[in-house]
Image (cartoon, grey):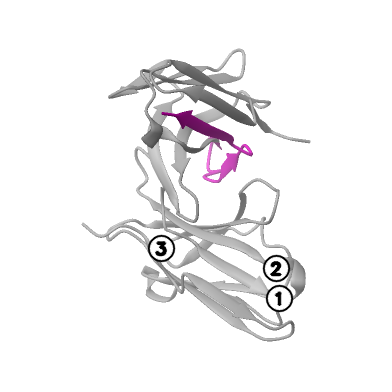
Amino acid sequence: KQEVTQIPAALSVPEGENLVLNCSFTDSAIYNLQWFRQDPGKGLTSLLLIQSSQREQTSGRLNASLDKSSGRSTLYIAASQPGDSATYLCARRGGGSNYKLTFGKGTLLTVNP
Amino acid sequence: EAGVTQFPSHSVIEKGQTVTLRCDPISGHDNLYWYRRVMGKEIKFLLHFVKESKQDESGMPNNRFLAERTGGTYSTLKVQPAELEDSGVYFCASSQDWPSEAFFGQGTRLTVV
């Protein structure tokens, strides 16, 4: 059973396009949801953290939303640039004392110049 | 401020040997986590320390894996004896209690041959 699903698995867009990455999760008992970026051979860079009481968070050209009732989060990237090319991962943290993050498999984004 | 650091960045060992991975969390972060990504799979939780205590080790695959965090500072993850299926990237992360944003290290790429 896959608890966190990311769609699409891969996405290729021309530079300048706005795009949306999707993340869905099966358990609505969520404490927070975190979006990460991973460059090839590198670690994970935290992009945005949305607490369960929040609906969205913004950082620069990035906007992440959270809809607990439907079990969905989206990451919106405005005016994409070639430097945005990376794998984007979402991870949910469960409620209570369960601190562990459950990850999706990620979306591989390629922004073409 | 230094981020989460992991040593070594790469390790190639033969089946049956022992390997020890090290993680230095962000200073002041009581929560320390180990995760692993094996080829083609999503990143999966291994265990969670709060200071020097194991809060959750439900993700540890078997008793060949031993994690320690003496003194509540850095942590080690030992694999003994290593098997081929242990190959993958081992990530360490740390967080404060609130807002519980997890910060990841660069990972250790382990190859068992």
The answer to whether residue A61 of the structure is visible from this angle is yes
Which of these two is toward me, A72 or A76? A76
Which of these two is toward me, B30 or B113? B113
Q: Looking at this view, name the residue that lies furthest to the bottom.
A: B17
Which residue is disc 1 drawn over?
A: B64
> SS of the residue at dot 1?
loop
Which residue is disc 2 drawn over?
A: B86
The chain ID associated with circle 2 is B
In this picture, which residue range is highlighted in magenta?
A92-113
Q: In the picture, residue A70 is in which quadrant?
A: top right
Name above or below for residue B49 compared with residue A82. below
The answer to whether residue B101 of the structure is visible from this angle is no
The answer to the question of whether label 1 and label 2 lie on touching residues, with beta carbons closer than 8 A, is yes
Report the side of A60 relative to B16 (left or right). left
Which residue is disc 3 drawn over?
A: B51
Task: Look at label 1 and name its amino acid.
Answer: Arg
